[in-house]
Image (spheres, rainbow, N blue to C red):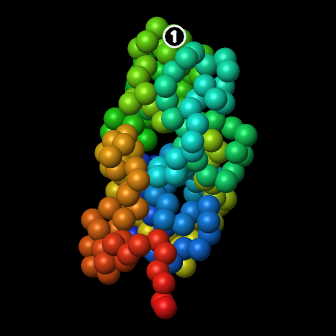
Amino acid sequence: MSTKNKDLEIAVGKMLVAEPFMLDPNFKRSVILICDHHEEDGSIGFVLNKTLDMKINDLLATFPVFDAEVYYGGPVQTDTIHYIHTLGDLLPNSVEIMKGVWFGGDFDELKNLANLELLEAKDIRFFVGYSGWGTGQLYNELVTKSWFLAEGDFNFVFNKKYFDGMWATVLQEEGGTKSVIGQMPKLISLS
């Protein structure tokens, strides 16, 4: 959907941030990197701040021994694995989604790079499933204030020190009321 409102301009490389009172357990306090967006087809992204207690070799026995964690990308097709990385042109058919961050690419070549020890865990993030929206759906969720958009940030994508408190950090960077809400604990007792 075209709009002149910059707050509603969905684009690859932007982060989708759950509004503070989002109740959906799949997305509560989530930060999602938008990796694909077409007005006529919808949007795809990956939750950046929900880790799973597993490594890539726990899921793919045919992948070379590689010490990389796997993250929850979203509730769609949780029987699939996706990845974002910093390899750029080293991985054919990958797509740059923001400066220094690439999506997908040739999986056989990825395994080859791991075998040759040209791939390090700090350079890639694997996701089980993805977050997806049909035509106009994400725009409508932005209008109804389920989400807000923030500029993509390489550190939030690849710097582990930001993963655990990412949602609160993004809200604090937004400032104002969001900053205050971002400092609230997950569970608040009114008694």
Left or right of 129? Residue 114 is: left
- 152 or 120, which lies in front? 120
The image quarter in which residue 184 lies: bottom left
Residue 34 lies, with reference to residue 125, above or below; the image says: below
**Residue sitting at 36 percent across and 71 percent down?**
182
Q: Position of residue 126 (x, y in %)?
A: 54, 35
Q: Position of residue 112 (x, y in %)?
A: 53, 11
Q: Position of residue 52 (x, y in %)?
A: 57, 44
Q: Badge 1: how crowded within 10 Å, few (<14), some, or many (20+)?
A: some
Kindly identify which residue carries mark 1.
115
**Residue sitting at 51 percent across and 21 percent down?**
66
Q: Secondary structure at mark 1?
A: helix
- 8 or 144, which lies in front? 144
Residue 15 lies, with reference to residue 119, above or below; the image says: below
Work out whether residue 150 can be spotted.
no
The image quarter in which residue 121 lies: top left
Residue 173 lies, with reference to residue 125, above or below; the image says: below
Left or right of 85? Residue 73 is: right
**Residue sitting at 41 percent across and 73 percent down?**
185
Left or right of 171? Residue 90 is: right
**Residue sitting at 67 percent across and 21 percent down?**
61
- 44 or 120, which lies in front? 120
Quadrant of the drawing holding the N terminus: bottom right
For badge 1, the amino acid type reads Asn
Extreme-bottom residue of the structure: 191
